[in-house]
Image (cartoon, rainbow, N blue to C red):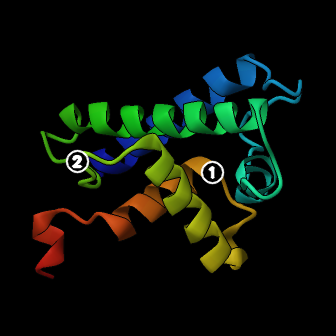
Amino acid sequence: MRTVYVVLFMLVSIAVFSAAAPTPSGDPAGPGFTGNDFLQKCDKGQSEGVDLLYCYGYISGLNDAFMYGKILWSGKPPFCNQDTTTDQNVRIVLKYIKDNPEQAHTSTGLLFLQAMQKAFPCAAEKRK
């Protein structure tokens, strides 16, 4: 149960802080920043320049938040993506959203977590 509260706290924190700062294009990226928004802003075939920098920063921030949050998970990370690059993480999230279009209306933060858990399950989860 504690894990649920920690994840919820982190997602709310990310949403609050990202809502406070406008994206480079001027639209707020608060809790309404969905997988569809992420695809439009971050798919290299549809965007360039400042939008891509925003995408890399967004994914890098989510990755850091979840990985530093592992302290709150009693040292157990939500996924195990050691040595991945931000570019790789962006591509994983984009692929996950494209492969699961029925979920694209949900929060990018939640989609990020699901994509990373699927791509990088931790050792204990791999055995299940």
User: Residue 60 at x, y = what percent?
Assistant: 47, 35
Q: How far is the residue under mark 1 from the one under mark 2?
A: 21 Å
Between 71 and 56, which is closer to the camera in this rendering? 56
Image height check: is 91 above or below 13? below
Residue found at x 57% / y 30% = 57
Q: Are marks 1 and 2 in contact (CB under 8 Å)?
A: no
Marks 1 and 2, the one that precedes in the sequence: 2
Which amino acid type is marked by label 2? Gln
Q: Which residue is mark 2?
A: 82
Quarter holding the C terminus is bottom left
What amino acid type should be assigned to the residue bearing mark 1? Thr
Q: Is residue 77 left or right of residue 4?
A: left
Give the left or right position of residue 69, taking residue 128 as reference.
Answer: right
Write down the quadrant of residue 12 in the picture: top right
Foreground mark, 1 or 2?
2
Q: Is residue 109 above or below residue 27?
A: below
Which mark is drawn over residue 108?
1
Determine the residue positioned at 23% across, 54% down: 80
Q: Is residue 15 left or right of residue 72?
A: right
